[in-house]
Each structure stands twice: as C-alpha cells, then as structure tokens.
Image (spheres, rainbow, N blue to C red):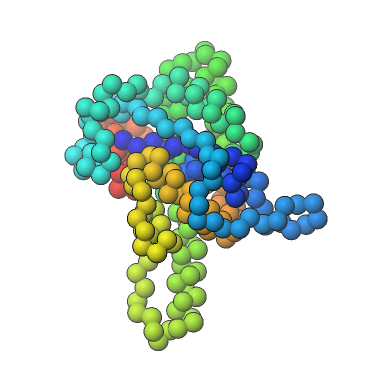
C-alpha cells in the first residue's frame, strides 16, 4: 500500500537534496578545499523549489485491515488505480533524468523494505515489456541511481546525542528511551512535533526530507558513505499470497 516516492528540492534548497525519501542531488560537501562550496548547514524548513512525483498503484491483492487503518488506503480506493507496469518504469525514468545528477534515493528502513520491493516491481514490469527499448533504457537509468538507507545514519546520530548527554550529566539522566522510527526521530528532532501526513507516501517523504536537512551536516557523510547503485539491490520475493503482508510491513515502517 506504500511505494518509495521520489522528489527533488532543486538547486535553491540547502543541500540540493531529494526526498528524499527519494532522490537527491549530491551538491553539498564537507570538503572545504579552495574552489569547493562550503559545507551545507542544517535547516528545519523544506526547500521552496521541490519537485514531487506521487503515484498510486493497484497492489493486485487485498489490503489488510491493519494497513488500511494506518495508511487510509484500502481496496476500494485503489481498485481504479493502474498496476505498476512498463509505463510506470518509463515515467520514473523520465522523472529521474530531469533531476540534477548524480541522484541519491533515500528511504527510511529502505534497505529492508522500500528498495527490494521497488527493485522487484521494476524487474517484473521490465520483464513483461521485454523488447521495449524505452522501458529498458528507463530501467537502466533507475538502476544507476544511488540509494542509501536513512535508518542507520539517523540511528548513529541519535545514539551519539544520547551518549553525549549521558557523559555531560550522568547523574541527572535516567535510562534513555531511544526510538528510531521516522515518526519518533522526527518528534525528537522538532520538540515533540508530529510529522504531518504520517504513513502516506508523500507525507513520509517530506518528513524525512525535513529531518535530513535538519541533520544535514552530520548525516550527509553517513548517507554518502553507505550509498550503492540501485541495480545492486536484491529484489524482494513477491507472491500474491504475501503481498498483503508486505503492505502491512510498509505501513508499520
């Protein structure tokens, strides 16, 4: 019931990134050598120039009640949506091509869920359109995109903050409760504020983008160090009988 969304804030925003929970232009750098731009500074605002691509797909299976309750998506509202097909592959490829290169696709817990699921859908749709050069070219473009999971990076930064706080005031600190879901990390970063539109593709993307931009100076090196071409991601094993379980997992994440 949820798919990785790709967006790009454009050149006007700090770090010139993608939502990121999607794709990002890697313009920012901590390298301060002559002729290189200064390291980007964190911000708690989304860029005004922000490209968005938000699509719904018919999952081809029943959406579980738990997933429907969390996401607000159910079989009735998705029944009229198209399946993920070769046209979807070409559309994603066209969107990525118009972004400043290279592109970095970021998803929270993406290594475990979003990236393998998207890879599986891309391969199935591409195989169904074997012989279509436009689809093959789009799939190749998407395969060259770099991808990085934000969960390890943000978890490392959060644990650093906890360790620093305990070291500074060890007697005043109780046992810290550290959580690493996107909603919990967002709330911790923004004084208890709840991310708007949680468990919707676009809402989660924008929440992750804002969180990454806020942590940008520290998290960017971690994201880049862990980045790998999307074509190297092993696809998830998709079966009709467990597709609903995958939708529930997406909602939980």
Relative side of 173 to 73, left or right: right
As displayed, is residue 226 above or below residue 132?
Answer: below
Most extreme residue toward the front, as rendered? 48
Most extreme residue toward the right, as rendered? 34
Most extreme residue toward the bottom, as rendered? 171
As displayed, is residue 187 above or below residue 149?
Answer: below
- Residue at the image position 57 percent from the left and 21 percent from the top: 137
In this view, the residue in front, 52 or 24, is 52
Point out residue 110 in the picture as x, y percentages from the top left corner. Answer: 44, 45
Tell me the quarter of the image containing the N terminus: top left
- Residue at the image position 37 percent from the left and 66 percent from the top: 178
In this view, the residue in front, 253 or 98, is 98
Point out residue 212 in the picture as x, y percentages from the top left corner. Answer: 51, 53
Q: Is residue 154 visible?
A: yes
- Residue at the image position 39 percent from the left and 36 percent from the top: 3
Point out residue 44 in the picture as x, y percentages from the top left corner. Answer: 50, 56
What is the quadrant of residue 38 in the picture? Answer: bottom right
């Amino acid at each position: 019931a949820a798919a990785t969304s790709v967006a790009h804030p454009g050149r006007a925003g700090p770090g010139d990134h993608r939502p990121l929970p999607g794709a990002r232009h890697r313009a920012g750098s901590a390298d301060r050598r002559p002729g290189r731009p200064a390291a980007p500074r964190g911000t708690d605002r989304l860029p005004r120039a922000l490209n968005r691509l938000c699509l719904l797909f018919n999952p081809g299976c029943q959406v579980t009640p738990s997933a429907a309750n969390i996401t607000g998506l159910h079989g009735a509202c998705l029944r009229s949506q198209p399946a993920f097909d070769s046209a979807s592959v070409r559309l994603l490829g066209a969107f990525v091509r118009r972004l400043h290169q290279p592109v970095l696709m970021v998803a929270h817990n993406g290594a475990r869920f979003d990236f393998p699921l998207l890879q599986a859908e891309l391969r199935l749709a591409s195989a169904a359109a074997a012989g279509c050069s436009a689809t093959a070219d789009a799939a190749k473009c998407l395969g060259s995109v770099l991808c990085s999971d934000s969960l390890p990076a943000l978890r490392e930064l959060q644990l650093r903050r906890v360790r620093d706080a305990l070291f500074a005031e060890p007697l005043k600190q109780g046992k810290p409760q550290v959580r690493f879901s996107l909603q919990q990390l967002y709330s911790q970063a923004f004084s208890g504020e709840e991310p708007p539109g949680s468990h919707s593709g676009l809402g989660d993307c924008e929440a992750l983008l804002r969180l990454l931009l806020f942590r940008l100076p520290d998290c960017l090196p971690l994201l880049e160090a862990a980045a790998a071409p999307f074509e190297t991601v092993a696809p998830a094993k998709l079966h009709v009988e467990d597709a609903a379980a995958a939708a529930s997992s997406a909602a939980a994440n």
